[in-house]
């Protein structure tokens, strides 16, 4: 996980991204080349997406678009190392000239995503099925005013490994079959989810804050491997 986090940190920096010049697709291929340079084998093509004030909805800004100051960037990367797979999503903000930090609304969106991570981790109790975990997690999150979407999957020798599924992107009411398996101790999972959050700094425009981090279920608790993203990467 340290390698994955390191690659993302470098990709989401001024060493790679030059606002007004670099496209999201450029960053995708930089990540892919970095994996090759490190001798790592990706198990899916990396992705980098842009959310922008005034461009409403995921996909509103194409990957061929040039990255500009004020953009919210998201990446999804995964590779194999020592026969184990990683699957990681993080986010970055491109600073305007004179800015020192991301807008408060975007920082709040990340905090909401972190809260959803905590809720799901608390509900991931050994012996419960994926569908039970999904249901209780969503009930708690919605009760707290969040707009959650949860789609965890087991990870290990395969990117989508054997074990219980906790939601799918388009199946938030439960996953028949795969979601009926119980959660076991000593297993790893990709804690994958997103929250939709209205950003006051963007005139109330809703952004999707998507996060993914590998966790280990050990002694009945869910532990992050090498931590999680709690601050947006900042690109100058």
Image (tube, rainbow, N blue to C red):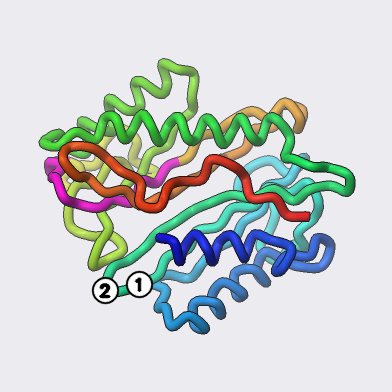
Image position, residue 58 (x, y; %): 60, 47
Q: Residue furthest top?
A: 143
Image position, residue 121 (x, y; %): 31, 35
Q: Quadrant of residue 142?
A: top left
- Relative placement, left or right, of 31 versus 104 is left
Q: Give the Cα distance between marks 1 and 2.
A: 6 Å
Number of marks present in the image shown = 2
- Relative placement, left or right, of 77 versus 165 is right
The N terminus sits in image quarter: bottom left
**Is 190 one of the magenta-colored residues?**
yes
Q: Residues within 10 Å of mark 2 (few under 14, many from 20)?
A: few
In contact (CB < 8 Å): disc 1 and disc 2: yes
Residue 60 in view of the camera: no
Circle 2: element type? loop
Residue linked to disc 2: 83
Q: Quadrant of residue 48?
A: bottom right
Q: Residues within 10 Å of mark 1 (few under 14, many from 20)?
A: some
Q: Which mark is residue 130?
A: none
Residue 61 in view of the camera: yes
The residue depicted at 77 percent of the width and 62 percent of the height is 66
Q: Which mark is residue 80?
A: 1
Image position, residue 220 (x, y; %): 17, 37
**Is 112 one of the magenta-colored residues?**
no
- Relative placement, left or right, of 18 versus 115 is right
The residue depicted at 59 percent of the width and 49 percent of the height is 91
The residue depicted at 72 percent of the width and 39 percent of the height is 102
| Residue toward you, 107 or 2 | 2
Q: Which residues are magenta?
A: 180-193
Circle 1: element type? strand
């Amino acid at each position: 996980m340290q390698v994955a986090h390191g690659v993302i940190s470098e990709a989401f920096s001024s060493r790679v991204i030059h606002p007004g010049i670099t496209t999201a697709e450029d960053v995708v291929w930089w990540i892919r080349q970095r994996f090759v340079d490190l001798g790592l084998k990706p198990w899916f093509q990396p992705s980098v997406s842009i959310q922008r004030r005034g461009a409403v909805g995921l996909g509103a800004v194409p990957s061929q678009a040039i990255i500009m100051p004020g953009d919210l960037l998201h990446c999804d990367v995964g590779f194999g190392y020592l026969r184990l797979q990683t699957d990681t999503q993080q986010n970055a903000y491109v600073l305007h000239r004179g800015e020192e930090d991301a807008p408060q609304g975007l920082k709040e969106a990340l905090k909401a995503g972190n809260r959803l991570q905590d809720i799901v981790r608390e509900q991931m109790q050994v012996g419960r099925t994926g569908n039970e975990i999904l249901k209780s997690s969503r009930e708690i999150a919605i009760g707290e005013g969040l707009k959650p979407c949860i789609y965890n999957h087991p990870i290990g020798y395969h990117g989508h490994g054997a074990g219980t599924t906790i939601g799918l992107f388009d199946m938030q009411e439960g996953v028949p079959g795969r979601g009926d398996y119980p959660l076991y101790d000593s297993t790893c999972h990709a804690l994958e989810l997103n929250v939709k959050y209205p950003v006051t700094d963007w005139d109330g425009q809703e952004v999707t804050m998507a996060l993914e981090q590998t966790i280990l279920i050990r002694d009945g608790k869910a532990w992050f491997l090498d931590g999680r993203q709690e601050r947006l990467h900042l690109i100058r």
